Image: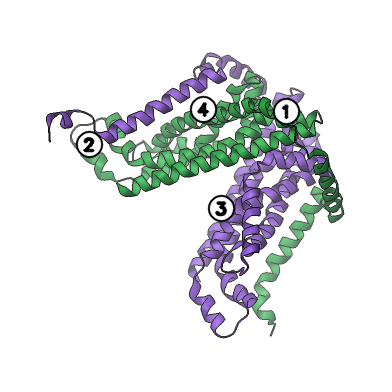
Amino acid sequence: MSMAKLTLPSKKYRQKMTVFSAVVVAVALACIYTNFNPLGIFLEFHYVRDLLGEMTPPNYHVLSDNSSTVMAILQTLSMAFLGTLYGGVIAVIIAFLAASNTMPFRAIRLTARFALSFLRVIPILVVILIFVIAVGPSTFAGMLTLVIVTVGNFGKLFTEMIENVDNPPAEAIFSVGASRMQVIRYSIIPQILPTLIANLLFAFDVNIRAAIGLGIFGGGGIGFQLQLAKSVLHYKDVTAIVTLIIIMVIVVEKISDYLRRRILGEGKLR
Amino acid sequence: MFSFKRYRKFILPLIILLTVTEGAAVICGATFGKLFEGLYRGIAFFGNMYPPDWSAFSEMLEPALQSIVIAFLGTVFGALMSIVFALLAASNLSHPWVRAVTRFLIGLERSIPEIVILILLVAAFGLGAMPGVVALSLGCIGMLGKLLADIIEEIDPLMIESIESVGGNKLQVIVFGVLPQIIPNIISYTLFRFEINIRLSVLLGAVGAGGVGYELDYSFGMLQYHRAFTAMIIIIAMVFGTEQFSYYLRKKLKMEGALK
């Protein structure tokens, strides 16, 4: 090995440095393009301080004075619940149509697959705006949006889950003369059920967060209350609502974590 | 044939599920009548939207670029912040107290939706790309910070020990012992987060970060549905394109990683 090879940086190192400097240049260009100054947040920090001054102390009277806040929390929860439930049911049905081991007809399988990947790329904003027009701004619109979003997010996962089940049980049942439906009922469903429920609990977690955002675009619920309080500049109410949102999300997460661990634990024992 | 005993254990959960569903349906005001009426109106509405307004197409390319740039900046700065948080939250590198506080902050951030952060930032800084970028970067911490911290806790401790034993300080341990082991993971998670941020930047745009999300919301508000249809097509193309791009990069990275 010559001296030059030992002292000069290796090809791999140069490659890495090229990529790294390309990213740095891209970041710099992007900052200039959007007029974004990374130090700006520190230079303009007094705005944050002013806002924090206006936001404290949180006004928890929104809970007692105004019954619509409690109702809004319930609305957000039920929106997420129904969205997860119906979205999950639809996702499972489409997943059975799209999985290669449950659907023998290629045409139907490809159609279901295409539907799932199409739903996956539609952003939530597009869906909510359409549903607000179709059923009017209400919690119902938010719920329907979550149904679509759940199908898009979890349909492909469920398809893969069905395709990855253990084959021998299905073959055993099939060999003693079971129909396709019976194979699904006695081999595939028992195998996927624990994972399915665990994933739906996770979906509920995700949907709660999404439901808060939907409120702002006409989905109702706590997000709408937040937007309302912010637009009339009641910042003390905003703080109270934000803390309520945080508590709600954390509680839901803990419950769903607990249930998930129990279900998956049981699944392992069987 | 049908044995009651076998299905007995499902009865109670089923009753609870039905009750909760019914209660939630009442709160949401969800009925099938409304659904069918809405379907009918929705289909009629698509008829109204149908020919997309192609003249608006060129005007919307710049907002789309803006959305992508916001997501890109948010991801890069968010990833940098997440690495710092992850280093502080890893049990093998930091003090237990620091770790507990950082883990708490990461968990707290994870429970605040990005859109709430953006609303607060817009209240502080006004509209524009800056609150969008900051909201997306902060949003990264909850997810990337936790994932990376878990990975750092599982790295090979021998490398750290050997650098410490020849007298390396903490910074040298991090730069030469920790980062080289986790860089492939950082890149692949960051790319994954970029996909999420692209979707979020569309949503955040409508609340005040600008970009193509704002165009869509604005067109809907102005009842210019043909224009809105164009915006939808651009958004879907953008999301699909960036997703394929990131998927391709991640796959390439994985193959390189396997060869090493």
Mark 4 and mark 1: Cα distance apart in space: 30 Å
- State left or right for residue B93 relative to residue A73: left
On the image, the x and y values in percent for residue B157 come to 28, 44
Q: Which residue is mark 3?
A: A257
Q: Which residue is pictured at 16% across the width and 32% down the height?
A: A6
Q: Which residue is mark 1?
A: B55
Labels 4 and 1 share a subunit: yes
- What residue is shown with label 4? B73
Q: Amino acid at mark 2?
A: Ile
> Which amino acid type corresponds to the residue marked 4 in the rendered image?
Leu
B256 displayed left or right of A87: left
Please tell me whether mark 2 or mark 3 is closer to you in this view.
2
Query: Distance from label 2 to label 3 (Cα)?
Result: 39 Å
Sequence order check: which comes first, mark 2 or mark 4? 4
Check disc 3 and give the amino acid type.
Asp
Query: In the rendered structure, which disc, 2 or 1, sits on the residue that comes first in sequence?
Result: 1
Q: Is label 4 or label 1 in front?
A: 1
Q: Quadrant of residue A67?
A: top right
- Name the N-terminal-most of marks 4 and 1: 1
Q: Quadrant of the N terminus of chain A?
A: top left
Visual hue assigned to chain B: green
Question: Residue B98, percent across and down?
Answer: 41, 34
Q: Which subunit holds the residue at mark 4?
A: B
Q: Colour of chain A?
A: purple
Write down the chain letter for disc 3.
Answer: A
Q: Which quadrant holds residue B231?
A: top right
- Per the image, label 3 sits on a secondary structure element best described as helix
Q: Residue at x 66, y 53 (%)?
A: A115
Q: Is residue B241 visible?
A: yes
Give the side of residue A55 with respect to residue B100, left or right.
right
Say if labels 2 and 3 share a chain: no
